[in-house]
Amino acid sequence: MKRGFLRSRWCVISALALLLSVVPFVFVEAAHAADDVIRIGVIGPLTGAYAFGGNEVKNAIALAVEKRGTVLGKKIEFEAADATDASQAISEFERLYAKGYRVFMGSYGSFADFAVQGVVDEYGAVMMSAAGWANEFTDNKIKNYFHWTPRVAVFGTRMGEYMPQYAEKYLGIKKENLRVALIWNANYEYVAIAARDGLKAAGITPVFEEGYPLDRKDFTALVANLQSNKIDVLIPCQGSVDGVPFRKKMVEMGYEAPMLFAMGLIYDQPDFGAQGAEVVDGCLVLSYTHPFIKRDNAPGLEEFAEGYKAKYGWYPLTHATQTYSATLFMLDMIEKAGAYDADKIREAIESADIPKGQYPNYWGVKFDEYHRNVGAGDPLAVGQWQKGELVTVGTDEIKVGEPIIPWDPSKL
């Protein structure tokens, strides 16, 4: 009798232990489901080498969340998690997921976005990258992953389209006669490849190409080679480590290509502009749309750009402008979905077809079967540094000034 009672009591205790081991998770999921909160997360570098860009993205999302205030009548909760490598990115994703986060915006730098995009389908979350341009982002059809901005391949295509038009209009040289130089550091060879592909599609073959190690210090020989080859158009693919000293060496040697047309990277960033007009003036740069486009055609851009500067002390990066716009779109899609549910949000995004001029970055929004935004990069912004400021000089829908080619400061 006693043994039977003990056995029965043990069974009850075991059943209760099993129930208690499950109940917290049930309660957690129920709490998340019943929460009057819409959660938006981002995982990326807030410290380390890419901290400036990561914080630009974080700031932009925070401002978008502040702008919207609520979605579906619920408060928006935003959290940014620091990750300086892929392993940390996954750990932070799992931490936020456990707190109820199901919607994630991409960050600055490719490693975190690549890591997180690989698990969103498995976990039933949805993600939108808005600050990266690697072609590999959309090589695979990931059900719950979307890419807001144009890939580097689009930049290459636009270079092949825009540059010959500028050369013919301002230099009087038809594309078949152009002498083009393409240079890059080892980190950005993939950017040079995109540029070369775009030029090839336009029927242009560079007459001079040179790649070099990232740690190169002396650019004297490279500048001398450009001079001796009588280059019409120079296309550099450079970051801050090499782009600034290269440009300073050009100035030191008194050399200016008739047209320098950069493939983004350092050439449209604040640290390039900080070098001063003597170094930066005259450089053209292909870029995402940013705060210096024609603001009348991009509703909300004025408020965002000036609000960002007032709060943080400088105008936002191109990546921040894109992320701000993408976050507003994502919040709109949650509203459209009618629920904080990854599947319903994905369906809302897939059905979106929004014309140009509806968001602060100006581009339209429509995703293809690879979840690439085919409206992105139509158009890209062409900027020129004039008096130490980046002025959008093309294309027509978004420009605010005219280019000076070849560069002549007396025309300012």
Image (spheres, grey):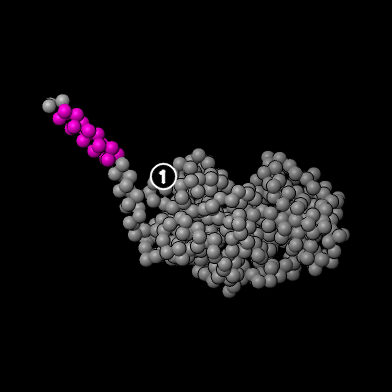
**Residue 227 image offset from top left, x and y in percent:** 83, 51
Residue drawn 30% across the image and 44% down it: 24
Comparing 403 with 278, the one in front is: 403
The image quarter in which residue 376 lies = bottom right
Secondary structure predominantly adopted by residues drawn in magenta: helix
Comparing 400 with 256, the one in front is: 400
Residue drawn 16% across the image and 28% down it: 4
Check residue 79 for magenta coloring.
Answer: no
Q: Residue furthest top?
A: 3
With 1 as the anchor, is 140 left or right in this view? right
Q: Amino acid at mark 1?
A: Arg
With 27 as the anchor, is 226 left or right in this view? right
* Quadrant, the N terminus: top left
**Residue 37 image offset from top left, x and y in percent:** 36, 58
Check residue 10 for magenta coloring.
Answer: yes
Q: Which residues are magenta?
A: 4-21
Q: Residue furthest left?
A: 1
Helix, strand or loop at label 1? It is helix
Q: How many labels were placed on the picture?
A: 1
Residue drawn 50% across the image and 60% down it: 347
Give the residue number, with chain letter if any, for mark 1. Answer: 95
Residue 139 visible, this orientation: yes
* Quadrant, the C terminus: bottom right
**Residue 242 image offset from top left, x and y in percent:** 68, 46
Residue 292 visible, this orientation: no
Compared to residue 13, the image places residue 193 above or below, namely below
**Residue 69 image offset from top left, x and y in percent:** 40, 65
Residue drawn 55% across the image and 55% down it: 146
Compared to residue 375, the image places residue 224 above or below, namely above
